[in-house]
């Protein structure tokens, strides 16, 4: 009964036509009302999808059989459209194809709001959406590709068999990766040459009378350029409307959370307190700390001091691996008094902050160790700071020197720097893990410094974690779990998008 009520509501949706097609350019914003709970669920699940797109794009050859298999699995698990020829019959379990397409539409626009705020966020969002679009478009049958092009004012027609026969030799000689055997079987699109400048520049197409004759495997290049341009302009327009969005006290914290969202385990639950002694920290920093924490530990040992950003990032990490409050006070005091801070000044100026970090002062909040996204995107380090992500915030030459100092091989440094150049900072850190632990292909997707520590301990312990006996539950960081089911009209949020 509940589904039938929902289905009738969807049937009256004025945008139902959008969901008749398996793919869209996201030109029209969603106009219906949705609850804040659905708003958050859609956003988090699309964010999980885009992070998977990023990881697969670096880990596998795009459009290889492994890439397609894993992408299909992820789309299916998160209930996004993944088969272009699926009809709208209600499956035995899970949402219908219509509901998946609705979710795809709405979730894209929600993340536009979250990821239009800075240049880095916009660049990341565009790249993942373009890769996802490429996968979906490539998977469309020829007729659906043509329908999609015409529906989106890309009125490119395919050549008839007669035209292909007449131009067969010229198409064969001028089209990249086309053999004589396949010319008859391939679709060719007749495209105004100004729409195919990249292909013309690289001499991949045959030109005649102002038209480029583009083989089906290359038409995606033109479509992707169009999609990228449209999305870039839309994000710029969305950014202009942010002040109005941020005035809504329900949405502002939610959107800020999404752009820094951590979707993995909760490392604030301390069931392993005291299992690590202070004497082990030096050894562990070299073996099991991610580079960001290794850098902070080294700076603390050398300077006997860390600024506030470094103390927060490193202190919460130590808390997450099992350092108790008493141990933390002893650790920080013993290090600071070796520098310019005496014991009395430490107790007055710094001890409160450590107790506050453990939820024993102030509002007594139980602060959570920083995730990779928080380290990368918030509070960038300035001169004299040592916090942040070395792969994101370090000068490339200094990062190379640091990796060389830690005895990373030249070939591995090259791979890491390529990932850094492509702005895949978490994947660069994961590659650093694989290199330093002599692991060919790590079986996890890195998203948290404390996850790095646990996986390191498992690897060094032969697959078992000798330092941690906690079975940490998987959860999404919650910002609005108890929000009421208040309807939110999305039309006002995206009217300029």
Image (cartoon, rainbow, N blue to C red):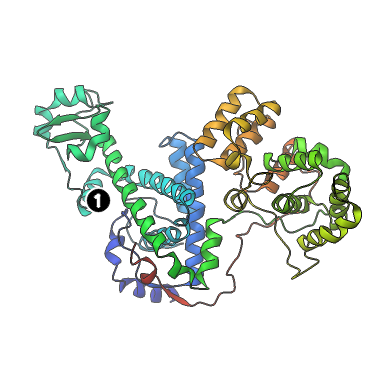
Residue 393 on image: x %, y %: 59, 42
Is 324 above or below relative to 59?
below
Q: Is residue 410 visible?
A: yes
- Rendered residue at 61%/22% (across/down): 410
Which residue is at the front of the view, 111 or 79?
Answer: 111
**Residue matched to label 1:** 148
- Rendered residue at 82%/42% (across/down): 281
- Rendered residue at 36%/59% (across/down): 237
| Left or right, 349 with reference to 428 | right
Quadrant that contains the N terminus: bottom left
Helix, strand or loop at disc 1?
helix
Instruction: Give the total number of marks visible in the rendering.
Output: 1
Residue 67 on image: x %, y %: 46, 39
Residue 461 on image: x %, y %: 77, 37
Is 261 above or below relative to 452?
below
| Left or right, 192 with reference to 496 | left
Which residue is at the front of the view, 475 or 201?
Answer: 201
Residue 428 on image: x %, y %: 58, 37
């Amino acid at each position: 009964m509940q589904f039938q009520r929902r289905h009738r509501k969807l049937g009256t949706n004025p945008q139902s036509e959008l969901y008749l097609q398996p793919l869209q350019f996201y030109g029209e914003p969603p106009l219906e009302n949705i609850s804040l709970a659905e708003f958050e669920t859609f956003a988090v699940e699309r964010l999980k999808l885009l992070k998977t797109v990023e990881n697969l794009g670096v880990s596998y050859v795009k459009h290889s059989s492994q890439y397609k298999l894993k992408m299909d699995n992820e789309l299916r698990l998160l209930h996004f459209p993944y088969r272009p020829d699926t009809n709208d019959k209600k499956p035995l379990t899970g949402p219908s194809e219509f509901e998946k397409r609705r979710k795809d539409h709405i979730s894209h626009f929600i993340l536009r709001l979250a990821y239009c705020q800075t240049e880095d966020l916009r660049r990341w969002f565009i790249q993942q959406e373009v890769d996802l679009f490429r996968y979906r478009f490539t998977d469309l049958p020829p007729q659906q590709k043509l329908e999609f092009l015409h529906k989106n004012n890309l009125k490119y027609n395919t050549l008839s068999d007669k035209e292909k026969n007449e131009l067969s030799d010229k198409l064969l000689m001028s089209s990249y990766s086309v053999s004589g055997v396949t010319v008859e079987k391939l679709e060719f699109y007749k495209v105004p040459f100004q729409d195919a400048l990249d292909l013309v520049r690289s001499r991949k197409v045959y030109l005649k009378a102002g038209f480029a004759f583009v083989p089906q495997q290359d038409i995606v290049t033109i479509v992707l350029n169009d999609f990228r341009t449209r999305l870039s302009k839309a994000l710029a327009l969305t950014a202009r409307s942010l002040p109005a969005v941020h005035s809504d006290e329900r949405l502002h914290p939610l959107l800020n959370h999404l752009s820094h969202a951590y979707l993995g385990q909760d490392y604030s639950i301390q069931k392993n307190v005291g299992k690590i002694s202070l004497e082990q920290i030096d050894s562990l920093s070299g073996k099991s700390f991610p580079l960001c924490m290794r850098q902070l530990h080294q700076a603390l040992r050398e300077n006997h001091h860390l600024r506030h950003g470094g103390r927060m990032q490193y202190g919460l990490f130590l808390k997450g691996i099992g350092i108790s409050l008493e141990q933390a006070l002893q650790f920080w005091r013993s290090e600071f008094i070796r520098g310019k801070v005496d014991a009395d000044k430490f107790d007055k100026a710094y001890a409160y902050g450590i107790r506050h970090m453990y939820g024993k002062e102030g509002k007594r909040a139980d602060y959570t160790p920083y995730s990779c996204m928080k380290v990368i995107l918030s509070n960038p380090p300035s001169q004299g700071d040592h916090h942040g992500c070395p792969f994101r915030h370090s000068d490339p030459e200094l990062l190379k020197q640091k990796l060389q100092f830690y005895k990373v091989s030249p070939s591995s440094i090259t791979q890491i720097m390529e990932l850094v150049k492509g702005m895949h900072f978490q994947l660069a850190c994961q590659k650093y893990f694989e290199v330093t632990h002599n692991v060919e292909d790590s079986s996890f997707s890195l998203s948290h410094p404390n996850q790095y520590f646990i996986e390191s301990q498992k690897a060094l312990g032969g697959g078992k974690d000798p330092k941690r006996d906690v079975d940490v539950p998987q959860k999404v960081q919650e910002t609005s779990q108890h929000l009421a089911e208040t309807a939110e009209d999305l039309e006002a949020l995206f009217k300029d998008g």
